[in-house]
Image: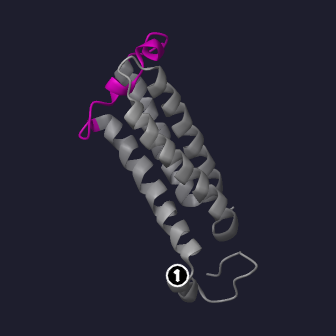
Amino acid sequence: MQATHPSYQGSHRELATTNPAWQAYQALHIGFVVAPVLAGLDKFTNLLTDWTKYLAPSVANVLPVDARTFMYGVGVVEVIAGLLVAIRPRIGGYVVSAWLVGIIFNLLIHSQRFYDVALRDLGLAIGAFALARLATSFGKK
């Protein structure tokens, strides 16, 4: 496999061992497949946390379903987003980044003031955006 970047003419092995941008792309690609899939699956088990506590009450109050059911839907979306990153990282990176911006908005309006989590998710959103940009050179379109 060769990179699609026009300035690189070496083999996949040379690319993996010598190009920091390729290595960064690979780290982001793997991370943004694994993290959304695991977080999505955990919406069904709550082993990591009770995810409903992060849903802003003002959002929960307008939902046509209860918070638990909504989180099941969130879990499905997150698993699909992670799989999209696996298959089409350029598109999936933008989807995950936009999804995280939505989560940030929810956290900022939450009465519990989860500003620390919102800040962490901003870093993740930037990372997912960077993955999408790097995928234009290294990944599948």
- SS assignment at label 1: helix
Q: Verify whether residue 51 appears in magenta.
A: yes
Instruction: Tell me which corner region of the image, top left, top right, bottom left or bottom right, holds residue 88.
Output: bottom right
Query: Which residue of the protein is positioned furthest toward the top in this rendering?
Result: 61
Q: Position of residue 46 (x, y in %)?
A: 26, 35
The amino acid type, in three-letter code, at marker 1 is: Ala
What residue appears at the point 40 percent right and 23 percent down from the top-left corner?
55
Query: Which residue of the protein is positioned furthest toward the left in this rendering?
Result: 47
What residue appears at the point 58 percent right and 58 percent down from the top-left corner?
131
Relative horizontal placement of residue 7, taking residue 13 as reference (left or right): right
Q: Position of residue 133 (x, y in %)?
A: 66, 58
Colouring scheme applied when the structure was drawn:
one colour
Pick the front one: 112 or 67? 112
Instruction: Tell me which corner region of the image, top left, top right, bottom left or bottom right, holds residue 73.
Output: top left
Which quarter of the figure is the C terminus placed in?
bottom right
What residue appears at the point 39 percent right and 36 percent down from the top-left corner?
117
Relative horizontal placement of residue 9, taking residue 39 as reference (left or right): right
What residue span does the magenta drawing correspond to?
45-66
Pick the front one: 86 or 50? 50
Could you tell me if residue 99 is visible in this image? Answer: yes
Q: Is residue 12 above or below residue 49?
A: below
Instruction: Tell me which corner region of the image, top left, top right, bottom left or bottom right, holds residue 130.
Output: bottom right
Q: Position of residue 84 (x, y in %)?
A: 56, 52
Q: Verify whether residue 29 appears in magenta.
A: no
Could you tell me if residue 88 is visible in this image? Answer: no
Q: Which residue is denoted by mark 1 in the rendering?
A: 16
Q: Are there few (<14), some (14-19), or many (20+) residues within 10 Å of tag 1?
A: some
Q: Position of residue 5 (x, y in %)?
A: 71, 75
Relative horizontal placement of residue 43, taking residue 134 as reference (left or right): left
What residue appears at the point 50 percent right and 61 percent down from the top-left corner?
28
